[in-house]
Image (cartoon, coloured by chain):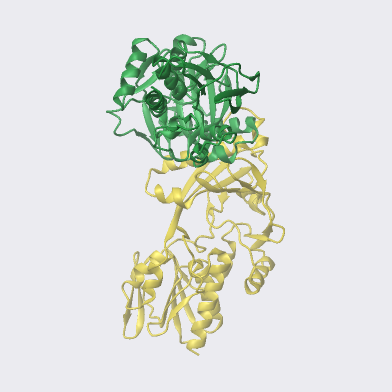
Chain colours: A yellow, B green
Amino acid sequence: MTSSNSVAIIGAGIAGLSCATALQNAGAEVTLFEKSRGVSGRLSTRVTDYWQCDHGAQYFTARDSLFHDEVQRWIDHAVAQEWQPLLKVFDGYTFLKKDNDSNTTRYVGYPKNNAPAKFLAKELHVVSETTVIGIHKQAGKWLINGMEHGIYPGRFDDVILAIPAPQAGTLLKNTTSDLLHICNAVIMRPCFALMLQYDYTIPCQFDGLFIQAGLLSWVARDSAKPGRKVASSRSSDVWVLHATAEWSALHVNDDRERIAQIMLSEFNHLLMVDASIQASAHALIAPKSQSLHRWLYADAEKYLTDICHYDTSQRIGICGDWTNGGKVQGAWLSGLHLAKQLITEHK
Amino acid sequence: MTSSNSVAIIGAGIAGLSCATALQNAGAEVTLFEKSRGVSGRLSTRVTDYWQCDHGAQYFTARDSLFHDEVQRWIDHAVAQEWQPLLKVFDGYTFLKKDNDSNTTRYVGYPKNNAPAKFLAKELHVVSETTVIGIHKQAGKWLINGMEHGIYPGRFDDVILAIPAPQAGTLLKNTTSDLLHICNAVIMRPCFALMLQYDYTIPCQFDGLFIQAGLLSWVARDSAKPGRKVASSRSSDVWVLHATAEWSALHVNDDRERIAQIMLSEFNHLLMVDASIQASAHALIAPKSQSLHRWLYADAEKYLTDICHYDTSQRIGICGDWTNGGKVQGAWLSGLHLAKQLITEHK
């Protein structure tokens, strides 16, 4: 691959950033388009004046040696750390210790989950706040049409879609690429994430909870992650609640205040059945402030395991966690492998 | 059927009482055996010094004309009344008005749900606090073996089992009757019922709630039924919560206090998401007193619709709601039809 190869990557989540980094290192000229202000996609952090909270991907693990090396690089650059939470499972009756956990090392971004993405983006050309609504071929080169600023001035040899399947599908409809069928086969599901800030520490016996009954699937003490307290000294406890995909899908367009109210009430239910809380007063624990986020494409009902896809004739690629078994590692490897494929094909 | 026909009926619930009444009216000599102190089976009421609560069957409807006439007789004798609760459905998000309810008339026992059973029992010979653990044939007559007092002095031409399928099955194992197979085919499920007494009235917008999400299936303001307030003037609100069959089965042998705690907490969750409660303070509503009951055979996973069964050669019959589509009406009709069959066969 030569430096004259220009690549447009849509989506500056972990897959897009990983792909961009590898392509740029191989000599390509890469431009990343991102609809949000910041990078990191679903490995992200909401920041307010007084507190912050990782409301998307909660942590990452590194079972693959390539990704393990990358995480070590992140740790060396102080943008990730190991997280050792007190994790439990609630089955609707008891809080059980999480089994077969001894071999699992969990990492988080430091001091926020979006830190690794920001670290990767530093070396890259990111065009942010640009929602790509169309890609068109003109004289053998790709044009990128953004909602906010119209047609981007650059021309690209390749386009990489590093975004959720439904969004990739929408862009592929403008093309003649067969990759559209792959996107259409994947159903992505929403997730409501409720962030709660308390001015005291909730005395429950878990930092993270996998929930097998009710409308919540996961709750975690975000402030128990390394570095979080320092960054938000005025709030002692920050929690994040994730609703199940099923419940989120059922109420995806319903009233936000009511969604938050029901999720908070279910969290209080969990706290009340936790033995350590039970002893304390019959008072519902009220957060000082809260914020609800709706992830429209939080996860896939069934992930693909194809790693990534590249349409050689059209010069379009797709990557993302959803093409590679899910998770942060899946996203990072997917972007990397797509980059390798482009490098091989065009050298 | 002549007055020389003697019949032992095991179980003084609605099926047993209905069967006994019809047989006695036809001239048979009937003895009812009941393991509890009182009659009424699952159409029952727990009574404390200060409050009472229908913790089993919640109400009854009368779609069959024979049962409709019987309910009218109960109303005429002031042991039943119509109940017009504010009923809603909670789907995990909103409280919906219950549809197609305009044609349904709901009745309850008056002033307690066990009143019709007591009314029926008045005319009958009931041997209470007698748990039948065996039935044996001796010289062509049935002997009844009770756990508390041993072999009952009477001898019987017929035995009727008006008890849940698993209990009937246990007694049938001592016999050569084929009815055992029928009992073994029915799976009955448990239900935890939590009764709560409050010293004020909970300002929620329902008296009864069908719940489609979570571990509760039904909650009702028992004190909103006719006659209940008078009988318990010192408690303004009495509620009953039923857990789902699935959750009850999962935790059927688990710690009672924890079961109650989790059910109460889930009720509080419901109250907090009810719009009218939401406005009030962030305080959990605490009951003044509470009582948990475990129904081991609350309902059948799938009800039979055979009405009843009679083994002519062995002279054993089985009846109950579970042989006849469930519900109070099913139980009453099942007992009645079994009586009619005996009367026809032995006249």
- Taking the image as shown, residue B110 lies to the left or right of residue B250, namely left
Q: Position of residue B21 (x, y in %)?
A: 42, 17
Query: Farthest residue in the left direction?
Result: B103
Which residue is outermost to the right? A102
| Left or right position of A4 against B130 | left
Q: Left or right: A153 with respect to A88?
A: left
Residue located 64% across and 30% down the image? B257
Which residue occupies the foreground of this view, A188 or B170? B170
Quadrant where the image shows the N terminus of chain B: top left
Task: Please indicate, yes or no, whether residue A49 appears anywhere in the rendered image.
Answer: no
B317, above or below A67, in the image: above
In front here: A300 or A166?
A: A300
Q: How many marks?
A: 0
Q: Which quadrant does the C terminus of chain B fall into?
A: top left
Residue at the extreme front of the image, as rendered: B139
Q: Is residue A299 above or below residue B47?
A: below
Task: Kindly tell me whether residue A135 is visible in this rendering.
Answer: yes
Q: Position of residue A109 (x, y in %)?
A: 61, 60
Position in image of residue A106 (x %, y %): 66, 59
Q: Residue at x 40, y 33 (%)?
A: B324
Q: Where is residue B64 shown, x and y percent of the image?
A: 31, 27
